[in-house]
Amino acid sequence: MSRPVFRRHDTASLSLDAACRRLTALGVEAVMSRCHPGERYLSFSCGEEGAAWEGCVPAGDWLAEALPVLAGVSLRGLSDGTLENLARRLPRSASLEVAGLPTQPFRVLSVFSGGNAVGISVGRVLITSVAESCLPAAPGALPANLPVTLDFLVGTGEMPVGAIKRLVPGDIVMIRSPGRTMLANGEPLFTYAFNEKEVVMEDHLDPAAAREPVAVTPDSPVGMIPVKLEFVLYSETRSLAELQNLRQGDALTLPEDAERQVKLMANGCRIGVGELVEIQGRLGVEITELTVGALHA
């Protein structure tokens, strides 16, 4: 079974708003800002590929700090290419460093006109892009590699204990309440839709929203106690960092046999595996395997 991979439909960089909040939590004075229209900026990057950030500073500030003799000198007569070459030959100023972010390797990128470029203002630097992997965790944050189990449900239902104990391979359990929900460690986080061989994240759900408990009356015979059923199309483990980056529109490629490996869960306990089937417009799972002991414990 091939491992599914999230496919991003937008930039892999952490959003600037989120990065600004993270830096602020680390004690860095950071605010959202814009470049000044008409002014030329020198852009640069710091960090290894996949864990780097990009920023820019007014070209005049950069050169005046590196070569004080240029302070106050107009740069209008210098072409963009000349400014880039000059910047690559000058030592980098410490004012281009941002606390908590990588400083090496350092690369001069290009000269550009400010326009309406948006970024995070930290001292003289305007951060225009930042990979989450190069940001330190906020104080008290959980480790980014903390594992989280994702379950992709195709629906829920309920069944009396006695009926569950009588199940045998070949039986079809109908899905009373069809619904595509992704659970994270048992809590609803996203609804999803099918797109050929992918599932695409749709609406974000509130994990704190309580799911309806199965009603049990005091005088219910043991065999008639209702059990909550969940039909899980696929499960896998992701890191907390990956989960925090998950957004509406992201896609997950499912294994080809996912519809033939639907897990039947009873009150969180796996009791069988089956194939997703449709009968007269209704979805159900035809049981192909039962978990020995789970039904008669």
Image (cartoon, grey):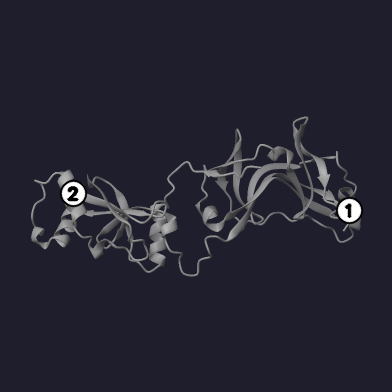
| Residue ID for mark 2 | 85
Q: How many marks?
A: 2
Q: Which mark is residue 100?
A: none
Q: Amino acid at mark 2?
A: Asn
- Describe residue 89's horizontal placement relative to residue 279 as left or right: left
In the image, what residue occupies the spot 81% across and 41% down?
A: 288
- Describe residue 155's horizontal placement relative to residue 72 as left or right: right
Q: Nearer the viewer, residue 29 or 131?
A: 131
Measured as percent of width and height from the top left, residue 85 is found at 18, 49
Q: Is residue 157 above or below residue 294?
A: above
In the image, what residue occupies the spot 16% across and 61% down?
A: 66
Residue 286, picture quadrant: top right
Q: Residues within 10 Å of mark 1 (few under 14, many from 20)?
A: some
Res 189 visible: yes
Q: Which mark is residue 224?
A: 1
- Tell me the element at label 1: helix
Q: Nearer the viewer, residue 210 or 129?
A: 129
C-beta proximity under 8 Å, tags 2 and 1? no
Measured as percent of width and height from the top left, residue 226 is found at 83, 53
Q: Most extreme residue toward the top, as rendered? A: 280
Q: Earlier in the sequence, mark 2 or mark 1?
A: 2
Residue 180, picture quadrant: top right
- Between marks 2 and 1 in the image, the one whose residue lies nearer the viewer: 2
Q: Amino acid at mark 1?
A: Met
Report how far apart the C-alphas of labels 2 and 1 lie in the structure: 80 Å
